[in-house]
Amino acid sequence: MSQQVDIELRNVIKEFTGRGSDSHTRAVDNISLTIDRGEFFSLLGPSGCGKTTTLRMIAGFEEPNSGEILLRGKPVQNVPPFHRPVNTVFQDYALFPHMSAIQNVMFGLEMEGVARQEALKRAGEALEMVRILPAQFNRPPRQFSGGQQQRIALARALVKRPAVLLLDEPLGALDLKLRKEMQYELINMQKELAITFIYVTHDQEEALTMSDRIAVMNLGKVLQVGSPEEIYETPTTRFVADFIGETNFLTGRIEDFDGKCATVRLDASTAIRASHLEEGLANGQDVIVAIRPEKINIFAAQGVVKMDDGRTENAVEYKQKLLADPDIVMVEGVVDYANYIGTDTRYTIRFGEGQKMVMREQNFGLRSDTYYEVGSVVNIFWDYETARLLTH
């Protein structure tokens, strides 16, 4: 059976007019998205990328200049927010300070004409679902912590049983520890309720942790949509690779193709291989090679190499063994910087004619006492498939 769709955006454009009649800012630039029922879907990007404007158009607080928005297959242009099967949770919670927790949650139901006893019952169930105790129901918002106020705001949004819950950076005001706790609470709540969550954030780790799929946005455009693994492991643009996690970028020119492998000349003394998925690439084309620091391995050019199982091997012999593997790419370089950061050590390696790469060596097990001093000659290597070829 095909997956049911809750939200669809078709070629949506939103412009805002400035003071001058000819002054227009295109906040959302011809985006198309399909969000499945029951999905935890995140809009991720820097400030000003259009993610909140997109959310506000789904909610009905803004109308697109062109394009179409469908909720469960029905166009919603000119349908006011209170007639759409969605509810929104904002970063500032927007709780009424003069009302108790349960009055805040009941408010929307009473505006819809739900009988008081029914509204009271449903509000109580919603508060208990987000772990607000009955003894706390009659307290005003100021007597709750930031995390508890966030839960009350969630209960107020969920009590109306929306088809889709929209969350606009709802954890932005919380401290780091509470933010991480609330991330897992939201994940569990979404799975239990089995309703669609559309989540706006600029925090890459938050999006990777919580989402079924992510849309990465910049300058009003959707650059890539995919699972957290797809977005992180197979970025399609330099912006996506740079925005999600840390990445090395090496610029070069294609020298040769071999199946899904391209040889890229970085400088006169250095050529490396990288995987490529794009069609239409040609010899002589300028490209970018993207490699994540954690995908790179390191060992000293001389002496012995300590293996994870406790064995040691001669460094020169170990290098020859690795070079015999057609999937391995290796360069010799010098350690420029070495920074111990607890779980791992971050090295900057200089090689070739001034090329530099950052790699991370985990500090665990038998290798935890291995440290490469600044100025050490080392070999770094990786599987060519972990190096991504990008054209823009």
Image (cartoon, helix red, strand yellow):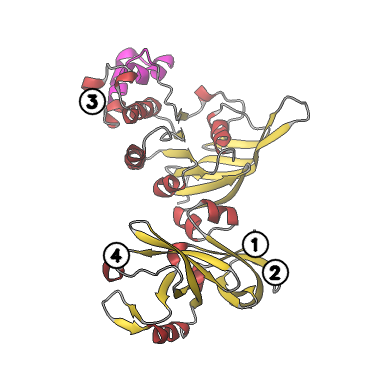
Secondary structure of the residue carrying numbered label 4: loop
Residue at x 71% of width, y 28% of height: 17
**Mark 1 to mark 4: distance in Å?**
36 Å
Secondary structure of the residue carrying numbered label 1: loop
Read off the residue under disc 3. Answer: 133
Between disc 3 and disc 4, the foreground one is: 4
Secondary structure of the residue carrying numbered label 3: loop
Q: Position of residue 297 (x, y in %)?
A: 42, 71
* Nearer-N-terminus badge (2/3): 3
Q: Is 260 or 348 nearer to us in this picture?
A: 348
User: Is 259 drawn above or below residue 243 in the view shown?
Assistant: below
Read off the residue under disc 2. Answer: 285
Read off the residue under disc 1. Answer: 391
* Nearer-N-terminus badge (2/1): 2
Circles 2 and 4: CB distance less than 8 Å?
no
Q: Is 392 or 258 nearer to us in this picture?
A: 392
User: Is 269 drawn above or below residue 80 in the view shown?
Assistant: below
Circles 2 and 3: CB distance less than 8 Å?
no
